Amino acid sequence: MNMRKNIIIPLVLLVVLALVFNCFFLDKIIRAALIKTGETIFQARVEIASLKTKFSNLSITISGLAVADKNNPMRNLLEIKNIYFGIAPRPLLEGKFIIEKVELSGIITDTARKNSGALPPKKMKKIARRTSPTILDKLWEKSAPELRKTAAFAAWREIKNISLPDIQDKVQALETLQTISRIKSESEKKISDYETAGNNLSVTEIIKETTENVNAARDLRINNVNDIPVAESLIKRLQNNQQKITSTAAELARLKNSLSADLTANDYLQQINQARDKDYQNTLGKVNLAGLTTPAAIGQSLLGPVWMGKIDRAIYYFSLVRNYFPKKKNPSKPRLVLPRRRGQDFVFPRKDWWPKFWIKKVVVDGMIAGTDFSGQILDITSDQDAINQPTLAKISGKSKSGYLLIEAIFDYRGERDINKVKIVLNGLPQPEYDLAAGIKLTGERMDSDNLFLLAGSSFSAILAARIIHPEFRGSPDDWWLKYLQNIPVLDLSVRAEQSAGSFKIDFRSNIDQILKQRIGDEIGATIAAYRTKIQQEIDRQVKEKQDELFGQVEGRKKEILARYNSEIQNIESKQKDIERAIEETRARIQSVAGKQIDDKKLKELKSLLGH
């Protein structure tokens, strides 16, 4: 009895100490660790209102999580009302942390803060020492300053000082003429291919052979049974001709339909008109408009920093994902026999073999831009090869005005990791953007389609947006803002990709053409007349080559189509001749065969009767 008391008392004390530690210290330690980790990742303040752990069901519940935006310290990147972690108990016995389910509810993005979310400089230095820059960071640092340059808006005040050079000096090396030359070469090759395809069918030889066999069938005399094999052989040749004619006619019909659809004036005209529009823009872009000298200058200067910031943020988060995913190790065979001090341990592989860390499922819900959303993230793990699954995410939401969709895949199996995120926003309220030179942009609604991809060391991004009824606001001194009012639709696209150790950015927007058009109209008829003369000169140079092209293509196309039609008609006419020849030959075979058989039976009958 005394021995039992000696065991029970320490055990009770141990349990009491564990409970006291859990009640007074564990929650605080976990909360502090999460805040420190979050601030290291996001490089901004992370706040947690409360954190509770439960040993009864091995769960952690977090309330009131807020993550500040490092680029805008007075805004929160996101807020999460409640977070729940459900931990699997059995893997803990093996030192593995498996979370069956995580629930993130009440997520809100881009909210205001009462105080700054910036970290103290001293703490930022510590974080910088712990995190080394990635190859993406280094490339972006080289490219970003040039991409974020703003245009010299002051030069626009001299907009009326326009010099109009000679038209002939500007209308040179037209892309349209190069396009016509390319189309001519392509069409000539296609026409040659169609001619060759028709020649390869050997229509003349087939018709000749068929005619010879039909004539042979007509001239064939079947006088007795001995002539029947010759007739049957001829029928087989005619049937073979019939098959050739059927397949050849079908191939001619296919070539005819393909040619009719392939070499169409409308397709060529569309390519020519697109090239001509580029020539219009490129030629007019060479005209000195006091600062508006390049098509992308205004749009990239005004809108570029915002969308470059989106790419900057994507690169940052991709770097985070790559940094916090485990580094690949050289695969080695599992040790099935482990030597011990006394004897050996034998390891038996089993089905439920867990990685060291694995969040099986994350369920999220919240609100973005007034739209309720929900979704899930699957298989966040320290070893994707162990479960043979990538990390997948899909979040979607709908509102009365539109919808949102976020899809992502992070695949670190194999030799090359793949990180892909697609974000689609349709019909959602337009957020306010701070543009260059203190200008703000709002709008009625926005549609956007964004794709970010990091595969190995290659990064690319495609961003497209359409803002309905955009509104630009700025200082009264910005006289040129009047040209940006009452724009029905603002379209822009950004394509970024890593190439040869640097980033290439292609920024396009219809705002450039809108501004040029409106400013040009206000300047007066001089620019309008000059524009017309340039277009007329381009049209004059293009028309001659275009008419020559269409004349040649249509002429050759008609010749080949006429040939196809004639060959189809000739070859199909032989079908009836073949059918008639086969029918007549078979009739003569049956007639002779029947007569010969009747005579033979008669002789046999007479022999039996003794005649």
Image (cartoon, helix red, strand yellow):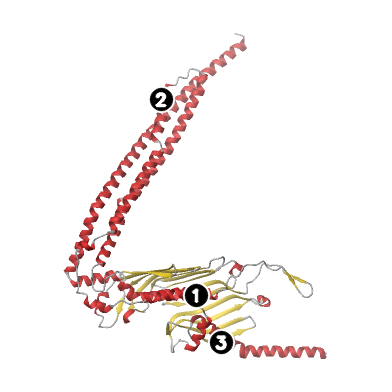
**Residue 165 in sight:** yes
Spatial CA span between label 3 and label 1: 27 Å
The furthest residue to the left: 525
Q: Quick one: SS at disc 1? A: loop
Dot 3, how many residues are within 10 Å of its Cα: few (below 14), some (14-19), or many (20+)?
some
Can you tell which quarter of the image residue 369 is in?
A: bottom left
Q: Residue at x 46, y 24 (%)?
A: 587
| Closer mark to the observer between disc 1 and disc 2 | 1
Spatial CA span between label 2 and label 3: 102 Å
Residue 539: percent from left, percent from top: 22, 57
Q: Residue at x 44, y 67 (%)?
A: 500
Q: Is residue 6 above or below residue 442?
A: below
| Amino acid at pointer 1 | Thr
| Amino acid at pointer 2 | Asn
Residue under circle 2? 215
Q: In terms of sequence position, does the residue under pointer 2 or pointer 3 come before the other?
A: 3
Residue under circle 3? 32
**346 on left or right of 494:** right
Dot 2, how many residues are within 10 Å of its Cα: few (below 14), some (14-19), or many (20+)?
some
Q: Looking at this view, is 82 or 206 the one in front?
A: 206
Residue under circle 1? 134
Residue 439: percent from left, percent from top: 31, 80
